[in-house]
Image (tube, grey):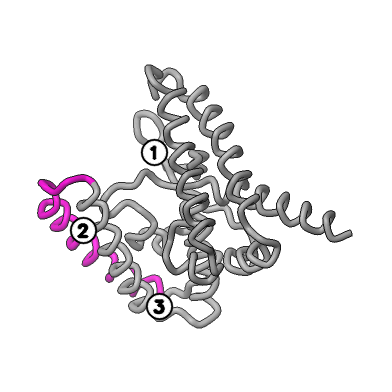
Amino acid sequence: MRNFCKASLSLALVVMLASPALAQRQRQRPGGGFGGGNLLTNKSVQDELKITKEQKEKIDEASKKIQEKMQKAREEFRDLKQEERQAKFQALQKETTEELTKAADLTSEQKKRFGQIQLQQLRTRAFTNADVQKQLKLTDEQKETIKTALKEGEDKIQEETKGLDRRTDGQKIREIRQKVGKATQGKIAASLTSEQKKTWADMVGEPFEVKFEQRRPGGGNRRPRNNQQLL
């Protein structure tokens, strides 16, 4: 029975990580990542959080100021090395998210759910977050295992997608990412204890699918789209 429970938890974690809600992740670009606060301006997220009209007005106003700040940062960080630039943007994105959340004056329940949705969007990358590692009480060995699994996944994707064109080979690239993603998820799930898996499940809450909008070719109205990019 104990082994069955452990197996069930491992399967549940992999399913959670592989779900469409957790598979969505915007390209990491200054001001465009979820950490930059844009997630709170997303209509589907606002609907999930039951954002009021007054809160939305505050979010819109704060978002404009944040966009100006991120634009200025893009210019200031342009000549930095990639790792240094990424670190600075991550810090700035965390800061602007806090600013936007504070401006929205979210209720305690809204803050909790918003935090869960943010974690879901980070997906496997969430396990490299210092706060997440602390809450899960990851050991140094587990941290190294996760770091290695993610690096191997990235290398594998680069290797198998080398020479492919995103415009003409999009489907094939997605299939490769999905295949490698599942392998990475399995490695991470296998490294966690049953207690850590329970904690993680509580941290991310019910799976939620963020809907993004994309212009139709040639313009026109926008329609919802789901970003299925993995890892």
Residue 18 % position (x, y): 61, 45
Residue span colored magenta: 55-82
Q: How far apart are marks 3 and 2 (CA)?
A: 25 Å
Residue 94 % position (x, y): 32, 66
Q: Mark 2 points at which residue?
A: 70
Q: Which residue: 60% across, 39% down?
A: 182
Q: In this view, does 200 lie to the left or right of 86?
A: right
Residue 196 % position (x, y): 63, 65
The amino acid type found where label 1 is placed reads: Arg
Q: Please, what secondary structure does the residue beneath circle 3 have?
A: helix
Asked if residue 170 is positioned above or below residue 216 in the image, the reply reads above
Q: How crowded is mark 2: few (under 14 residues within 10 Å), some or many (20 or more)?
A: some
Q: Which residue: 55% across, 34% down?
A: 180
Q: Please, what secondary structure does the residue beneath circle 2 have?
A: helix
Q: In which quarter of the image is residue 185?
A: top right
**Quadrant showing the N terminus:** bottom right
Is there CB contact under 8 Å for labels 3 and 2?
no
Residue 149 % position (x, y): 51, 43
Q: In this view, does 201 lie to the left or right of 92?
A: right
Say which label, 3 or 1, has the lower sequence index.
Answer: 3
Q: Name the residue under label 3.
A: 54
- The tag on residue 215 is 1
Q: Distance between the residues labelled 2 and 1?
A: 23 Å
